[in-house]
Image (cartoon, rainbow, N blue to C red):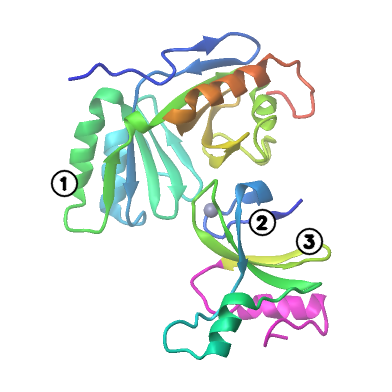
Amino acid sequence: MLTLQCPYCGVQCDETELSPGGEAHLTRFGPGSDDTEFEQYLFLRENPRGVHFERWRHAYGCGKWFHAARCTMTLEVFGTYPAQVTEPPADLIEKIREKRPGWRWRDLA
Amino acid sequence: MSEVVSALHGRRTEGSVAVRDTGPRGMIQVRGDLGAEALQSVCREVAGSGFPGQGGAEVSDQGAVLWMSPDEVLVLTARDRAAEGVTRIGAALAGTHHLAVDVSDARAVIALEGAGLREVLARLTPANMHPEAFRPGQMRRTRLAQVAAGIWLTSETSAELICFRSVADYVFDLLANAAASPAVGHLPVA
Ligand SMILES: [Zn+2]
């Protein structure tokens, strides 16, 4: 069972109170982009065994989107943070570095 | 003027945990800057209660203000005062970005009474109903079986909850069924 803290409500949400939103921090490539960029934006996703960054929506609560960093293998949650950012907060990245030395996710490490 | 009827027509069950339709209630959805003094004070006036912080429920014998999200509260008042409440909130917040809607007919309010109510709720929601995790003064929006609900304790032995009107019978039946089952004794009883 996955339990995530909604950063807006502060409540511990059960997975079934949330809607999954897929990978976090995607850069959108739309009109004007080349085919490779568009293909990557639309179809190519990380599928890590370990540290992952995802979007979740507190569907049975405040209704807002937030981000979560967790381990796909152990379900350990490193932290959750509001969605109004383009990359994870520095202190969260530091925490993951300590817990999972050598981790890598897209261009984060 | 049409006759005001609650979704559950006053349904109630008795037992160690009683489930009861609380009848027509005035409910005003308010969105805006929850930190603004004008918004807080007009909500306090309309509800006759305090104004909650994050995740809070401020309840009085006249009404309540329930924290729904970082930019939304639900103001409870008497059913026949909801329209006037919307007008007052609109006047107080004129010129600022906000929304105030009478949602009295869109929702149902159900009350639970009895020492074992935490266990009745815990049968239906994934939210932690333990006394250390959920106390009077808190508002918990969550899921009851397959539908959304918001729960707040009015004392250690009484709670109220809101759900959408269209699922009021479903939620009432769920609660009545859960309340009819014998206590498991996992959660401490008040
Ligand atoms: Zn939330």
Disc 1/disc 3 C-alpha distance (Å): 49 Å
Residue B16 belongs to the span the image colors magenta: no
Residue A94 belongs to the span the image colors magenta: yes
Residue depicted at x 27% and y 37%? B45
**Label 2: how many residues lie within 10 Å, few (<14), some (14-19) or many (20+)?**
many
Residue depicted at x 67% and y 35%? B131
Q: Can you give x and y, in whole percent of width and height, for residue B95 in the image?
A: 17, 58
Q: Can you give x and y, in whole percent of width and height, for residue B156 in the image?
A: 60, 26
Q: Amino acid at mark 2?
A: Leu
Vertical relation: A106 (above or below) B77 = below
Q: Can you identify the residue that label 1 sits on? A: B91
Vertical relation: B9 (above or below) B186 = above
Horizontal side, residue B93 vs residue B116: left or right: left
Q: State which region is magenta.
A: A82-109
Q: Can you identify the residue that label 3 sits on? A: A75
Q: Can you give x and y, in whole percent of width and height, for residue B172 in the image?
A: 54, 21
Callout 1: residue from which chain? B
Callout 3: residue from which chain? A
Taken as a whole, is the magenta stretch helix, strand or loop?
Answer: loop
Find numbered disc 3 in the image and state the secondary structure of the residue it sits on.
loop
What label does residue A4 carry, if any?
2
